[in-house]
Image: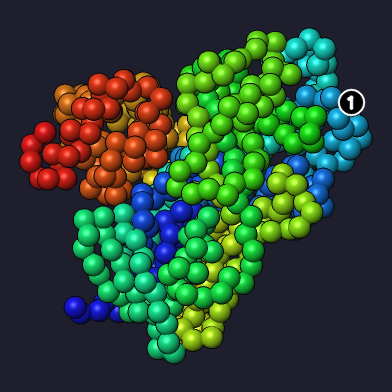
Amino acid sequence: MQQQAIDVLVVGGGINGAAIARDAAGRGLSVLLCEQDDLAAHTSSASSKLIHGGLRYLEQYEFALVGKALAEREVILRLAPHIVRPLRFVLPHEPHLRPEWMIRAALLLYDNLGRQRAHNLIHSRRVDLHEHVAGAPLQPQLRKGFIYSDAWADDARLVVLNALDAAERGAEILTRTRCEQARRDEQGWYVQLRAANGGLREVHARSLVNACGPWAAEFLADVARLPQPRALRLIKGSHIVVRKLYEHKYAYTFQQEDRRIVFAIPFEQDFTLIGTTDVEFDGDPSVVRIDAGETAYLCNAINGYFARSIAPTDVVWSYSGVRPLLEEEGRAAAEVTRDYQLDFDAQGAPLVNVFGGKITTHRKLAEEALDWLAPTLGNEAPAWTADGPPLPGGDLDNKRPADNTNFDRFLHNVVQRYPWLPGGLALRYARTYGTRVHTVLDHAAQLGDLGENIGSDLYRVEVDYLVRTEWARSADDILWRRTKLGLRVTAAERARLDTCLQSMLRGTPA
């Protein structure tokens, strides 16, 4: 069997692996990324979907992490203005949990650490909840609150767009392909990859990146046969989704008696996203679900603030992910740092191990990894992603500086160009694909040109695009990661999508 030779093999198709593949390909290195499941199939699609500094980390003196994350918030808002947007948070004041002076000081520091305001992110301020629109859904005893800015992101699409950009720069992306063996010597890594259909592929890579997330330690022990340089702590975080609890566009940050915070965030037009939990986890990261205790915790968190109560029976969807955090003895799960560590191993062919991290800092993590890795491969290309072109679909208006008004102008142009698109569908297409909406719609001149409506305005033309361009292979890939239409489709519509995909992948008419 002939071996394929490449510069960088990235194992893991989450946000860090995809970002590293993108950065490496942009520096002119030959790259192959393999992922045992779908892109963003696990932790990277199970976040709170925020691009934020992490206000609560200030209480743990994580000033460097917060500053780094807030700087990245600005960059990511520019790189992906279609899937990332500013979001204003309301923090009701509960004097017995944290005194007002502490919250004011934290917000002032947060404002100063995130001092750039290119995206119209407002400074924090105090509000009267009995007069502000965000106070209407809250219990009447909550009179005082604070407003501050962060950003929301479609986390799974952020992964896909990094992988897509990497592919368009020459990287090869292999989903549903498991790295089974990895052996190294001074010349490189000799790797065996196995596809879902059983096909075996051998690769010779000059370097290897272990971006396996919760499986990072397992990969080192079982595949690379190397010792683990850092201990990881697996923490499960779960979220619930309910029918929307209020009409306005603000999110909430709710303090809890255990010193944690819980978010309530507007989600997919008609829903409210609530999370997250922090629970020690020692099982299989590929099989992780919310438990009854977590659901009750999140419902109680909401019921302590909103006038309208919710119960577990109100949950329409839930999801859980396992965060691989750096072990810190003696610290509770919620207090363990969300910062990352890159382990650079040059004892033989170069190896980069990625430990920890959060979705907000993925680009910076990738840049730091390549700043070390590229020179070891004889590549002196400079870092490029901070000031480089946007992610696919993010070039909404190249004639103006990027800000959160660009999307409104872009959406207006989409509606004018495709006046036959229903308003809700035009908005979803614009938000999901940005300027790539024109590739999705291609030569369509009327609604009938989009093909069969499989359900909930999922037309055949979109399915075709996702299979052809974004590595979608299953109903879950489309309904939960490329879109969130899983919240709306019926069982019959999902079955129809399954049939459609099976026919497409076999190359026969559906």
Residue 403 appears in the rendering: no
The residue at the point 91 percent across, 32 percent down is 99
Residue lying furthest left: 508
Image spot of residue 404 (x, y percent): 55, 37
Image spot of residue 468 (x, y percent): 23, 48
Q: Which residue is mark 1?
A: 95
Residue lying furthest bottom: 186
Q: Secondary structure at mark 1?
A: loop
The residue at the point 31 percent across, 59 percent down is 177
Q: Quadrant of residue 365?
A: bottom right
Foreground pick, 468 / 421: 468
Q: Quadrant of residue 456?
A: top left
As drawn, 101 above or below 375: above
Q: Is residue 24 left or right of residue 115?
A: left
The residue at the point 45 percent across, 68 percent down is 222
As drawn, 8 above or below 276: below
Image spot of residue 75 (x, y percent): 58, 52
Foreground pick, 502 / 371: 502
Residue lying furthest front: 283
Q: Quadrant of residue 264?
A: top right
Quarter in which the C terminus is drawn: top left
**Circle count:** 1
Q: Pointer 1: residues within 10 angstroms few (<14), some, or many (20+)?
A: few
Residue 373 appears in the rendering: yes
Q: Is residue 476 left or right of residue 123?
A: left
As drawn, 207 above or below 257: below
Image spot of residue 150 (x, y percent): 65, 39
The residue at the point 19 percent across, 78 percent down is 1
* Colouring style: rainbow
**Which amino acid is tagged 1?**
Pro
Q: Is residue 487 left or right of residue 97?
A: left
